[in-house]
Image (spheres, grey):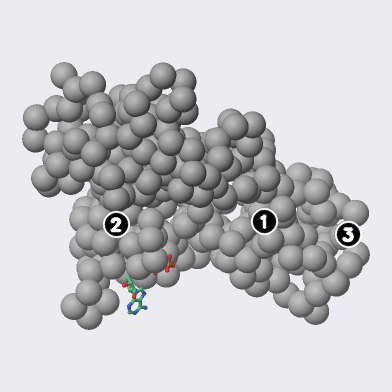
Amino acid sequence: MAEVRLSRLSKSFGAAAAVSGLDLTIADGEFVVLLGPTGAGKTTTLRLIAGLERPDAGSVTIGGEEVTARSPAERDVAFVFQQYSLYPHLSVYDNLAFPLRSPARRLPAAEVDARVREIAGLVRIDHKLDSRSTRLSGGEMQRVAIGRALVRKPSIFLMDEPLSSLDAKLRADLRLELKRIQSDVGSTLLYVTHDQIEAMTMADRIGILSGGELVQLGTPRDIYTSPANLHVAARLGNPQINLVEPGLIPCQSVPRGTRTIGARTEHVEVEKAAAGAAANARIDWIEHLGDQNHLHIAVDGRRITLLADPYSGFKAGDAVAIRLREPLFFGADDRRISHG
Ligand SMILES: Nc1ncnc2c1ncn2[C@@H]1O[C@H](COP(=O)(O)OP(=O)(O)OP(=O)(O)O)[C@@H](O)[C@H]1O
């Protein structure tokens, strides 16, 4: 296990900068998730750490040793990709044993066997050790791929959207398991995703990348409650944060310089107008998602979307009174303005 330190790391492809001036330190045993839109530089960052790309500038240090000029094999890093990349002609057992049987390692057979069985138990695939990898479900294949990365006990794990090709239920199961496995093994893990739920639930810290730059790094709670700017605010939260101009919805105090107000569900109080408050908005329509509803509210020609529980009693067409409660404020440069 090891700390990973990236200093001023940059990589361009032709004229386009994929990663620019990236400074990021991942502590020993930490689970860091890189979140960002397509093309933000997430995969390139992982490939630079693995040694699959050479940086144009900057350095990569793993466990206190600079490895920038070393080959992937010399870096003690395991990579799990979106596609399972198992050996189809081998059994689960042999897929797991494969990294231990390389000529460079020459581990005794008993040691290989013990390690394979331990890891198979950890990733809960021990009942399928004799199956050909092509006979597995997608979720099982990805467990094997994760197990194969774990089996060598590398210093760090790099995972590039490992759950994105699975269906929603499997993704949710494996999300929990990956977190459990990582805390059992105590490994340093850098994980790339588009999925904000994966980021929020698994990360010790989230790094938000945009245009090859690290825009913000912090705990999921920090990033959610104190986003550095509009870009970060829009990356987390479902439904997406509502961005409105000051004055549209009543708000107790708005800091000077505010150009945009960011309002999530918890920042908006909605009351039926009949309860005594004067109506300033109307429920436009309600989307029923099962466990929750999305309320689409029309206010002065604009629309905002909030979550509501299915028993809230609102109906389409209801006149409502809405007001803001400690929302987020952003200035003309899109950066968040803190209150007071
Ligand atoms: N081998 C390459 N050759 C040319 N351009 C590349 C190469 N690899 C990446 N790029 C470019 O670098 C930028 C960053 O790509 P990268 O794959 O790191 O983004 P990403 O955040 O992982 O995106 P995605 O979520 O779509 O995987 C993109 O503009 C991409 O087109």
- Seen at 58% across and 66% down, the residue is 82
In the picture, the quarter occupied by the C terminus is top left
Secondary structure of the residue carrying tag 1 is: helix
Secondary structure of the residue carrying tag 2 is: strand
- Seen at 62% across and 48% down, the residue is 288
| Front residue of this view, candidates 183 and 109 | 183
Residue that badge 3 annotates: 128
- Amino acid residing under circle 2: Ser
- Amino acid residing under circle 1: Ala
Q: Which mark is residue 168?
A: 1
Q: Label 2 to label 3, Cα distance in Å?
A: 41 Å
Task: Compare marks 1 and 2 and give the one earlier in the sequence.
Answer: 1
Q: Position of residue 119 (x, y in %)?
A: 75, 49
Q: Quadrant of ligand 1?
A: bottom left
- Amino acid residing under circle 3: Lys
In the picture, measured across the screen, residue 81 lies left or right of residue 180, that is: left
Secondary structure of the residue carrying tag 3 is: helix
